[in-house]
Amino acid sequence: AGCPTDGLLTGTDGQRWEVGYCGTVRMRDGAVPARRKEAEVEYFVEQKVECVGLTVGKPRQVGENLWAGQYPHIRDVYARLVLARPPYADEPLWNAEQCRGCIVAVMRGPRPPGPVVSYGMKCYHAQQAGAAAVVFVDWDPKGKFTHIPRIDEGAIRDGGPKLHCRIPCCFVLHKHMRCLQEGAMHSVAFAPDRNPFAPFGWKIGYVLCPRQESKVTMSKERADELMLEFLKE
């Protein structure tokens, strides 16, 4: 009992092998594969979606009928993407350990008549978990970019802790949610100021998941289940 026969082995260099054992020696006793072959490599699909940076505080007036967002926190980030749990980040993140140093995807909302959860509260909990950046995802399937999304610093609730936004935050539409692939390396990048293709005062950019080998140990079916859980909240 407890003697391996077939399985998937990952070497110290990250190379994965389909292996077979004789079935008579336990792993703890030094079982050595009787046969092995290089495992088929799985890849994350390359995806690129547009995003909009959140202004910190109220946009400032810079001319007659001209308003510009404030983006001292905005910078480009390249890191692994993790889905926030709970999805709305309305309390300290349950998966904080996995979020450290990562780009964390957080759902906007909940949708009415649910309680209001501010971007500030969501960002605070992501920062406390050590996130490198936050990608907010709209809950509305019909949503569009109609205004500059805003995150307010200060107390996240009456008498609560205060947020000082230190990490880049952006917003993507609901229709692009499935382009965010948990466990894959993603880039969050922003266009230079006064980009001729952006509305005045907006900070536009993109979230890119380049094609890459999947090192995620969960099955595709389990990954799809987690995404559905994230979306249905």
Image (spheres, rainbow, N blue to C red):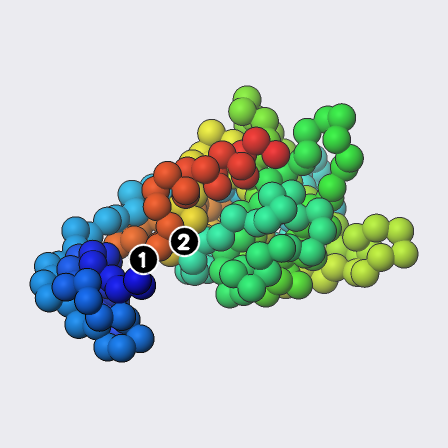
Q: Is residue 135 above or below residue 33?
A: above
**In this rendering, is residue 86 above or below 110?**
below
Position of the N terminus, as image quadrant, is bottom left
Q: From the top left corner, tell me how far across and down residue 223 is, in percent.
A: 41, 43
User: Residue 105 at x, y = what percent?
Assistant: 53, 47
Q: Which residue is mark 2?
A: 183
Q: Is residue 136 visible?
A: yes
Among the two numbered marks 1 and 2 on one chain, the one whose residue lies closer to the N terminus: 2
Residue 54 marker? none
Along the horizontal axis of the image, is 78 left or right of 165?
Answer: left
User: In the image as oriented, which residue stretches furthest toward the right?
Assistant: 159
| Residue on which disc 1 sits | 215
Tag 1–tag 2 contact (CB < 8 Å): yes
Estimate the spatial distance between the alpha carbons at disc 1 and disc 2, rounded to whole Å: 8 Å
Question: Which SS class for mark 1?
Answer: loop
Q: Relative to the observer, which residue lies in front, 150 or 106?
A: 106
Query: Circle 2 sits in a helix, a strand or a loop, which is it?
Result: loop
Q: What residue appears at the point 55 percent right and 22 percent down from the top-left corner?
A: 142
| Rendered location of residue 179, percent (x, y) | 40, 39
Q: Please tell me whether residue 141 is drawn above or below residue 164 in the rendered image.
A: above
